[in-house]
Amino acid sequence: MRFLDEVKIRVIAGKGGNGCMSFRREKFIAFGGPDGGNGGKGGDIILEASTERHTLMDLRYRSIIKAGSGQHGGSSQLTGAQGVDEIIYVPVGTLIYIDETDEFIVDLNEHQKRFVIAKGGQAGFGNAHFKSSTNRAPRKFTKGGLGEEVHLRLELRLLADVGLLGCPNAGKSSLLSVFSSAKPKIADYPFTTLKPQLGVVDLGEMQSLVVADIPGLIEHAAEGVGLGNQFLRHLSRCGLLLHLIDSTEGVEGLSNKIMIEKELKEYGSDLYQKERWLVLTKVDLLSAEEKALLVKETQSMKNVFLISSITRDGLTTLKNALRQYMCSND
Ligand SMILES: Nc1nc2c(ncn2[C@@H]2O[C@H](COP(=O)(O)OP(=O)(O)OP(=O)(O)O)[C@@H](O)[C@H]2O)c(=O)[nH]1
Ligand SMILES: [Mg+2]
């Protein structure tokens, strides 16, 4: 299944029901008077965030979404029923934009947060409404208004505290799998991860944090190469990025670091400016000398961690640092 994190839809709120033109006809009453009822208001289009949705996938097949129309008014002052509202459920973290202008409208960043994106048309008035002391038999009535119509772009940005960043095969998903109860796919070929995944890391003492694992990045990702930069947006809400580098790559690993930093810069200053820690993975594959050399090389750098998701080496140290980071950012 494809992960869909951007979708365009057209929403049309319901039409208002027309007012009715009618006069009371009763056997022994000569002039019964106007009794045409008002129409019902058209249904609204409402967007609502839900933790039960994880992608925008189901909206892909619903490019036009309409709310119910209000019913017309009837005689005997009968008011038409209101049109049924249409509620569109989206994942928590969905941003709503007007497609044509790219105007940002709302960030549905909390479960059950709602927003009326298109209002239903107003109800028409029946002729009874226009009755006055000077006009006792109005023939006037109004039609219901059209519902609002909007073209929207919905963009999903995952809500995570910490984002994992790195080249394909760096060991991102492996770290997520030992850190959290998430079960991402892990394999020794690049681009195993095709869609972002979240995992909750238990830090103890009632504390937890959400980690986002995104597909691997390669050179020119910011211009759309590989799986492109579409997934970088999911890191935009993370406070901290863990930059994972395969420690067995040696010097080449360092050039990958520079490459990824370049991609971040090109994607936008926001990501580049985020706090970033260096995590050297797969240290179980290094000889004692190689490991010692790596420690020496990175000695002067701040926030460097050497880990192995297989032997669990260094994981406690990393977790403790994350706990401290979360406490200081509370
Ligand atoms: N020996 C060893 N192998 C590891 C370790 N971490 C990951 N691997 C292996 O490295 C390969 C890639 O791991 P993944 O976790 O799938 O890497 P990824 O960064 O998620 O890769 P993409 O999803 O393709 O971007 C797999 O074969 C893992 O078993 C580790 O700490 N030690
Ligand atoms: Mg992966």
Image (cartoon, rainbow, N blue to C red):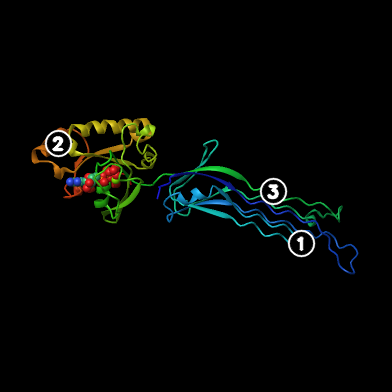
Q: Of the residues under marks 1 and 3, which one precedes in the sequence? A: 1
| Numbered disc in front, either 1 or 2 | 2
On the rendered structure, is 283 left or right of 182? left
Q: Residues within 10 Å of mark 3 (few under 14, many from 20)?
A: some
Instruction: Report, in whole angstroms, how far the alpha carbon at label 1 lies from the one at label 2.
Output: 85 Å
Instruction: Give the residue number, with chain letter if any, for mark 2.
Output: 294
Q: Residues within 10 Å of mark 1 (few under 14, many from 20)?
A: many
Q: Position of residue 300 (x, y in %)?
A: 17, 32
Q: Is mark 2 within 8 Å of ligand 1?
A: no
Q: Residues within 10 Å of mark 2 (few under 14, many from 20)?
A: some
Instruction: Report, in whole angstroms, how far the alpha carbon at label 1 lies from the one at label 3.
Output: 20 Å
Give amino acid for label 1.
Answer: Gln
Within the image, what quadrant is residue 70 found in? bottom right
Q: Position of residue 173 (x, y in %)?
A: 28, 47
Dot 2: what SS?
helix
Instruction: Give the residue number, with chain letter if any, for mark 3.
Output: 145
Dot 3: what SS?
loop
Front residue (pair 8, 304) = 8
On the rendered structure, is 241 left or right of 133? left
What residue lies at 84% left-to-right and 53% top-to-bottom?
139
Q: Of the residues under marks 3 and 2, which one precedes in the sequence? A: 3
Instruction: Report, in whole angstroms, how far the alpha carbon at label 3 lies from the one at label 2.
Output: 71 Å
On the rendered structure, is 231 left or right of 69? left
What residue lies at 83% left-to-right and 54% top-to-bottom?
132
Instruction: Give the residue number, with chain letter if any, for mark 1.
Output: 77
What residue lies at 76% left-to-right and 50% top-to-bottom?
142
Q: Which mark is on residue 225?
A: none
